[in-house]
Amino acid sequence: MLQIAVTGKPNVGKSSFFASATLSEAEIANYPFTTIDANKAIAYITADCPCKELGVECNPRTSKCEDGVRYIPVELIDVAGLVPGAYEGKGLGNQFLDDLRQARALIHVIDASGSTDEEGNPCDVGSHDPLDDVDFLRNEVTMWVYSILERNWSRLIRKVMSEHLNFAKVIADQLSGTGVMLEDVIEAERIMDDDYDKWEKEDILRFLDRLLQLSKPIIIVANKIDSPQAEKNIRRLQDKYDLVVPASAQSELALVNARKAGLINYTSGEDHFTIIEGAKLSDKQLHALEYIDENVLKKYGSTGIQKTLNIAVYDILKQIVVYPVEDEHKYTDNKGNVLPDGLLIPQGSNPRDMAYCIHTDIGEGFTHAIDARTHMKISSEQELKQSDIISIISNK
């Protein structure tokens, strides 16, 4: 299962984001280091389920479907608040950087209202520039990886040069505990010259910056958009950075809780909700819902939480959803479950790759695949598309 880390300074709404995205009971309080250990929980990205198109009723096993929208599980890791200098042990230090090892992507929650200082303490709204918070996270992660490489760098490079070893493989092996992949090292190496023994600290850091852009890509969540001060900061963030999603984690949490209480009909990611007929709301609850509707949903089109998750998986990690079945005529598995699983696989994958994603044995025994929509055999090298329904034929 894909793992995505939710990180950022204390007090920026990170735990609220995590709670609203996973419906978990992560503790939420207004002081630094509320989250002492990394919490893990399941969140869901959304995809169009083929059930409506095919006129069938699906019964998912590892996901869920509501009105033709398939919810595909991913794992979120709520990493406790970082502060500048964490790689040197400040705040709660390397404990939290270590929590990032498993993550394929990072969701960086920042306070777009500017009401949290650089250490994560509450301050006057607008007194802190949120743009200052963006680069610090990448710097912390880069310096964390640099600290791992730096202590053995001279020895590693001497070994590469004297034994004519593959630089990328040596570095990937050294960083295997950080989740860095060999192909990312190979790609990052392209921007550098191969006189590795002449690299200075600045060269290593430039290499690592590029490597981490590939292996730990970041999406910026500009949180607290319901604050009037946030609007101009969001424009500034979007002018400078590519992936910035305006969000209000507290609004999403309020809407989700109101839905759970039977007060409203609401689907995460939508731009509206409806109050259930006969629901008894207090004046305070009604005012809060009206405020969210006017200042978040109508203004920004959603709370941004579901949008963030979808962008992280589809746009940053370049995944697609496919549906493996055994019976291509009934779209079922061997137990009769209709469209049982929505499987996340990398863009560009072919049926053989898909087989390995299902199980190593199925991949090793792969013989051919059938497109369930056309009932035609397809090439093992054919690139799969979003929402493909595929029957894998394997002799294992």
Image (cartoon, rainbow, N blue to C red):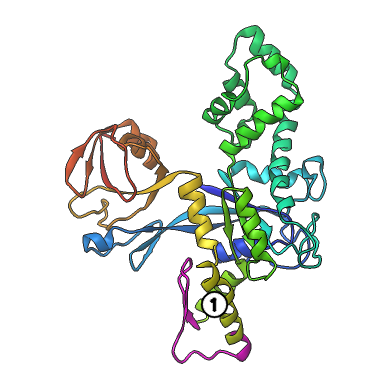
Residue density around tag 1, few if under 14, some if 14–19, many if 20 or more, within 10 Å = many
Image vertical order of residue 328 relative to residue 369, above or below: below
Which span of residues is magenta-colored?
A: 263-285
Residue at the location (59% across, 13% down)? Answer: 165
Q: Name the amino acid type tagged 1.
A: Asp
Q: Position of residue 363 (x, y in %)?
A: 34, 34
| Residue 290 is at least partly visible in this image | yes
Q: Quadrant of the C terminus?
A: top left
Residue of label 1:
293
Decide whether residue 194 is among the magenta residues: no
Against 133, residue 164 (above or below) is above
Can the viewer see residue 1?
no
| 361 displayed left or right of 208 | left
Question: Which quarter of the picture shows residue 128?
Answer: bottom right
Residue closer to the observer: 367 or 191: 191
Residue under the image location 59 percent in, 26 percent down? 172
Position of residue 354 measured from the top left corner of the image (x, y, whole percent): 35, 39
Main SS of residues in magenta: loop
Q: Position of residue 278 (x, y in %)?
A: 46, 92
> Could you tell me which residue is drawn at 81 percent across and 55 percent down?
119
Q: Quadrant of residue 346?
A: top left
Measured along the vertical axis of the image, is residue 217 above or below residue 190? below
